[in-house]
Image (cartoon, rainbow, N blue to C red):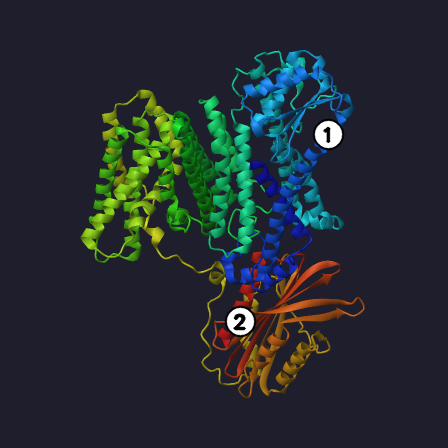
Amino acid sequence: MLVWGALAVLGAGAGQALSTTFDLGDIAGAQACLVRNGISVDGTDPVALDQAAYRQCMEDNLRVQATAVLAGAVALPAAAWLLVLLGGLAERWRLRPGRITGIPAASQRLTERFAVLCDSQGLTRRDRPHLVLAPPGTGVTQAFTTGLPGTRPWVVIPLAYAYAEPIAFDAVAAHEVGHVRARDVLWASAVWWAGWLAVPALLLALVPLAAAPEVVWEFYGLSLLVSLVVAVVMFVLRAGLLRRRELAADRHALEVTADPNALARVVKPAKKRRTGVFAIHPAAADRLALDVDAPDREGGFVSTATAGVVAMTTYHATYLVLGSLLPFNGTAISSASVVAALLWASVVVPSWTRQAASDPSGWTGRLAGAVVGLVVGYCLQPPGLSTITAPGPERDLLPLPSLLLVLVPGLVVAAFAVALLTAGLVARLAAHPGHRRPGGLGAALAVTAVLAAAVGTLTGTATVHVATGGTASFRSFLVTNGYDQVWRHTAALLLVALALVVRRPGRPAAVVSGVTAVVGAVAAALSWQLRLDDQLSDARSAFLAYQTWWICALAGLVAAVAVVIVNGGALPELPSGVLCGLLVAASAGGAQYLIRRVRHGGDSNVFQETLQAPGWLLVLALVGTAPLTASLVVMVRRREPRHGAVRWAAGGVTALLALLLVAGGLSGVTTAESDFAQPDTRSQLAEQASPRPDPPVEAEKPLDQAAATAALADVPGVLPPGAKSVPNIPDDSSSVQTPATCDAALDRSIANEKALPRAAEVEQRFTFPLGGRPDGGSISVSITSYSTPPPGFSDIDAENQACADFRQLVSPEENRYYDFHITLRPALDFPLARRRSITGRGQLKGVATLFAFEHYTAIFGLNRVDVALDWFHLGTSPPQAFLDEVERLVTNAMNAIVAKL
């Protein structure tokens, strides 16, 4: 499963690279659409600005991208499977019966020895391999094992071993049977092909960029470097797995033959030593130095770390697809987290269970591998695939230091907590082998629930924290994320899963749990009742409710630690402690619920108040304090405390934590009343814009030329430093637009405007620095004062309809043109106003260029104010700060004019 998951991730990366470089989804058109709506793709979160506009602009592109990613995720594993199949068929054709006829009688002795070996290993029916003795004419010089899906594997051994020492044949045969017993024949073949499929797939996707290397470096440079590094890392992991596979088979051969010198008879130093991190076979010296009695040096670190890397890169690929197809509501994050957690649990739990049976004390390598694999895998960018760490498809927010500072420590703690829980569950299964089947299912469910909740919650929390800042947002999202449509069932699922693993926690655990449950229930009830007031605000009421739930959760935390300690502090007791902690939190929550219903009545949710809220907070507390509580258990275990002392200490600690919480001593890590206050939703852009002025009182009077000129006097003050006045551009009605209906609408609008009688007309134009260019933008402001009331915006509305998409020829000699699109923007500041963005795409001196024209017009009685700002940007869309500056200038210029009318 792990191998196919890795292949799917590599294929998904190649699919996205193919979609991007071939521009299958018209990304330039999507970016132009975003720009028309004031949204950039420079690394900020566009969904926070205008989710509906973002989805409308990117919908087609994201759908094509998701399809390409899915196609790659299916195509690469399918190609690997096909190559494995063809490779197996080719070997069987090479070793077909017609080519190995005339085998000497000496081979019968080898066949008999091989049958005895298979019997001793319990290999029967389909698991029993077929021995093929290959004569020299077949070209087989080394023994190997080959297989086809659904058939018996073939162990191929050169016929020359019929004339060698029996121990040499036994060593070779036992080595190959070790591969059969480990069931690694097919996945090893798939891993071998994976290395040679990933690079060509990515190179094929990057072919269109070869013609413009400067574009590759400017827009894809960092991603290509990261992808190259990750591809090298995956090659190293691939080689490491294949080397470990060979060493594991060698270890099996030594165990079967019971001869430490067996390998020395068949392993010869290579003429050209194949060493280094890319070698897929171990060096002869490493093979000859094997000691079956020595513990495994890395203790499961490599395999566990690989599982973490593959699971987290699968999270990125799954989120990219779901985030592209689903509206942004958190479903993509939670679903991708569940998929990744399920993959990790289904691989690691069975693997650790097998390892614990042979080495019950070697947990250091496995725990370290889990932490390193999950954290590194989350932070890696799979080759060709955009790293997704925050909401908003194609958001590559990982390089942000602020996001890393939030994510990495949280990921380390969460990964350690999940690894510790997994170790405890596996140790419990190893200690009680009679419950292996239902217990294994329960262990996988428990690990999946906790890991998925941790990854999904940390991703959403870090994003919210970076976007809003402050610990309040971080703390509030952590707490309230338990109401998510998926995570709300985390505690209940964990409770059921642990019940499948832990049948009877024991009497000491029951006594400790009872004490903490009673103390927690009393403390929670008192914290609510003593501060109850008829004048409670909604924020205050929510704060008090969460404090009571936190008290229940803290009682569960104390119970979990105390149960582990009172049962001896051994690793198999960890599941019992977590199960008792959940029961204590639910019991305290249930008692609090009953008291509130009896005293005050009203509608309430029994599941929410007894298990969902206290249970979710307990999961947060268990994960967040895992390093501290694990250290505490180790220290206390050495002193062998008495059961009675632990029981009363648990009650006292629960009461002390409740008092600290109510007094505000734990507000920084639990909840604070300010978390429930209504947030200030004003955007930074609104704060920077000048205040909207009231409409002019004497707008019914026409202005003379002097008054109209005076109304424009404050415009230079709102422009950036370096702005300068330039001559107005004369009207040019000679340009022709396509379609003809657009050209006719523009001509009609110009003619109607010129026919209106007017008392005054003033226009001024300025250029100003924008986007790093001294004259990067220009703005034209005008006031037209009519003698009679103007007809409104019927002509502009007709233009918008006829010219929604139009083309304008700019160079007949070069047949060069620009394609434009009109987007209507909201204009709600004044009663009679229109706002539109006209964006165009074309080539300027061979470089793709984006042009934009922002038009804002408003009518006040007999006076019409027009603000028109135009700019251009080379390459892709400009950064968000650029677009925000344009928005601010248009709004401020309009407000400055209206204030002077």
Residue of label 2: 894
724 over 629 or under it: above or below:
below
Residue 26 visible in the snapshot: yes
- 374 or 795: nearer the viewer: 374
Residue 852, image x, y percentages: 63, 66
What is the crowding at mark 1: few (fewer than 14 residues within 10 Å), some, or many (at least 20)?
few
Name the residue: 48% across, 32% down.
Answer: 350
| Tag 1–tag 2 contact (CB < 8 Å) | no
- 862 or 626: nearer the viewer: 626
Q: In this view, does 402 lie to the left or right of 261?
A: left
The residue tagged with tag 2: helix, strand or loop? Answer: helix
258 over 900 or under it: above or below:
above
Q: How far apart are marks 1 and 2 (CA)?
A: 86 Å
Closer to the chain start, of discs 1 and 2, is 1
Residue of label 1: 96
* Quadrant placement of the N terminus: top right
Q: What residue type is labelled 1?
A: Arg
Name the residue: 60% across, 49% down.
Answer: 70
Residue 234: quadrant of the picture: top right
